[in-house]
Amino acid sequence: MDETEGEPARRPSTQAETARANRSWWDADAADYYEEHGSFLGDAELVWGPEGWTEAQLQVLGDPRNLAGADVLEFGGGAAQGARWCALQGAHVVSSDLSAGMLARAVDIDARRPGPAPELVQADATRLPFAEDSFDVVLSAYGAVPFVADSAGLMTELARVLRPGGRLAFSTTHPIRWAFPDLPDEAGLRAVVPYFDETPYVEEGPHGRAIYVEHHRTLAHRVAEIIDAGLRLVALHEPEWAPDNRETWGGWSPLRGQYLPGTVILVAEK
Ligand SMILES: C[S@@+](CC[C@H](N)C(=O)[O-])C[C@H]1O[C@@H](n2cnc3c(N)ncnc32)[C@H](O)[C@@H]1O
């Protein structure tokens, strides 16, 4: 993500600092984010990432007809477009997000749009206000996972609210991208930092105060966190750039999409 204005640094950041910084950042950025990306995302589509693929195309969650009657939780849902798509398939949906600003965009969409509106909940995905075994499907497109320090704890929390036999699916920045500058052009094609260095990316304001934080895990560590949470990994997708997608999103571009994966989608079952 490139929409920040602070001084970039690589340094440790606790879960508390990360959550405080990112809540404020997403609150402040919510309007600009939807101005810039809202039409690409649609109001009621589950778009898995800047490559441009939708759930209707990839069917990461399986046959969409199986969503009818299912209890679905979207975490880090932003304006809840993914949850809205699931609702159109007949699911009972809750969309949650850390940021009131992002949830306000969901309220705006539901106010102007006919059709089923998801239940909206403000929550840090590492501490969800739901009982265990509450959902058949737990999903997110780029929500929360890159933005938490305790990603192992996040996996455990997502597993807790999932029913036995239920499915977790989430997309996040492909870990290999951390070795490359976050630039959409040729400069973003040359590895400059070690892939194995998991030091967080922190944008700092005055006095070193974190105003935006992203966390990196190698692919091996992401998979290990899923397994350690008691889940069974059932698929790992590295979607190629969609041929008709001309949209550049920060460091994600048609050019880089020819050479490097930008998104990983991990799918697991309880
Ligand atoms: C890149 S946006 C993705 C939003 C939406 N899924 C989409 O595709 O537009 C990341 C979202 O994660 C949310 N987020 C960040 N940290 C979170 C946390 N700890 N718990 C829940 N949501 C979080 C942000 O508020 C933001 O809405």
Image: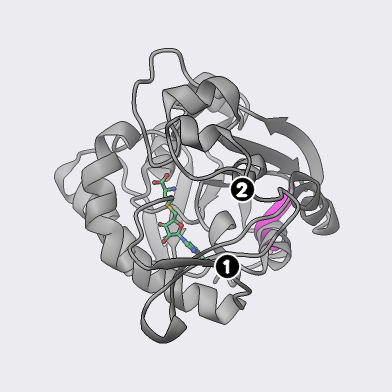
The residue at 33%/63% (across/down) is: 5
The residue at 37%/37% (across/down) is: 249
Magenta stretch: residue 179 in it? no
Q: Which mark is residue 178?
A: 2
Q: Nearer the viewer, residue 149 or 185?
A: 185
Q: Residue furthest top?
A: 243
Q: Earlier in the sequence, mark 1 or mark 2?
A: 1
Label 1 secondary element:
loop
Q: What is the image's colouring?
A: one colour
Q: How many marks?
A: 2
Q: Which mark is residue 76?
A: none
Observer-side mark, 1 or 2, equals 2
State left or right for residue 228 relative to residue 129: right
**Residue 133 visible (yes or no):** no
Q: Is residue 96 above or below residue 188?
A: below
Q: Which mark is residue 130?
A: 1
Task: Name the spot of residue 245 as percent of width and height, x first.
Answer: 38, 20
Q: Quadrant of ligand 1?
A: bottom left
Image quarter of residue 261: top right
State left or right for residue 165 relative to residue 263: right
The residue at 66%/58% (across/down) is: 158
Q: Is residue 212 above or below residue 180?
A: below
The residue at label 2 has a CB less than 8 Å from ligand 1: no
Amino acid on which disc 2 is placed: Trp
Residue range in magenta is: 160-165
Query: How busy is the neighbourhood of tag 1: few (under 14 within 10 Å), some, or many (20 plus)?
Result: few
Amino acid on which disc 1 is placed: Phe
Label 2 secondary element:
helix
Distance from disc 1 to disc 2, alpha carbons, whole Å, reads: 33 Å
Image quarter of residue 11: bottom right
